[in-house]
Image (spheres, helix red, strand yellow):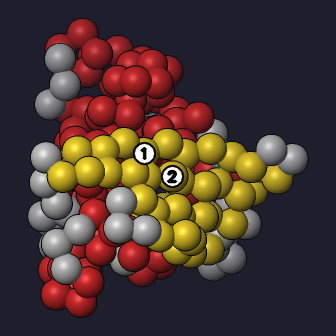
Amino acid sequence: MSASEPAIRASYAKTVIASMKHGPASERDDMFSRLDPTLRLSIREASLLDWMPARDFAVLPTLVFEVLGAARAKEFWRANLLASLERTLLSPLRLGAIALYGESPGSLMRMAPQAWQLVSRHCGKCSSGEMTSVSFNLQLKQLPPELQTPGMLMLWSGGTESCIERMKFNGHADAELSPGEPSTATIHAAWKSR
């Protein structure tokens, strides 16, 4: 892999594989039967901070989307990223966001650009958009083609919903590629108190 190639941290792929293992047996078996054993082995052997090609990582969200469908894929990513917020890589960002901005889903989403920098390289830029006390927009620009997929949209929307849930609010999130500009994705989130 060249230093300029779009890449994602191997730790991210490892959390996906772990989540796939905990699903219902029929879905788990279907996903793993479709996953190239060479790719699975490379994920297993990689260290947490290693980089893997984004095109290889993108296989995982596509696989989850194809096996589970849109609604269940979004739920898969919500649960996956909810657990990741408690793990070593993202926990410091979560704690920092709460300390700086308070106990709100918007607090965590304000840290999304830093999280994206932590887990991706040459995969575009994440920026915060319009924010109110009950809604937030994020934008990912200059996405490489391998990340311009329905599976990645479910990953981003489900991950955003995990931020809402982690802060004990009710809400939803959706992600879409910009019409005429597929290298830009926008994530819209809204929430309310429970």
**Residue 63, horizontal then vertical, whole percent:** 46, 29
Disc 1 crowd, CA 10 A, few/some/many (<14, 14-19, 20+): many
**Residue 58, horizontal then vertical, whole percent:** 54, 45
Side of 169 relative to 16 (left or right)? left
Foreground pick, 101 / 33: 101
Quadrant in which the N terminus is drawn: bottom right
Where disc 1 sits, the SS reads strand
Residue 12 sits in which quadrant? bottom left
**Residue 166, horizontal then vertical, whole percent:** 16, 56
Q: CA distance from mark 2 to mark 1?
A: 5 Å
Disc 2 crowd, CA 10 A, few/some/many (<14, 14-19, 20+): many
Residue 24 sits in which quadrant? top left
Q: Residue furthest top?
A: 26
Tell me which label, 2 or 1, sits earlier in the chain: 1
Residue at image mark 2: 188
Q: Disc 1 residue type?
A: Ala
Side of 58 relative to 173 (left or right)? right
Foreground pick, 53 / 156: 156
- Residue drawn at (87%, 47%), measured in percent from left and top? 180
Foreground pick, 101 / 68: 101
Q: Which numbered circle lies on residue 173?
A: 1
**Residue 55, horizontal then vertical, whole percent:** 60, 50
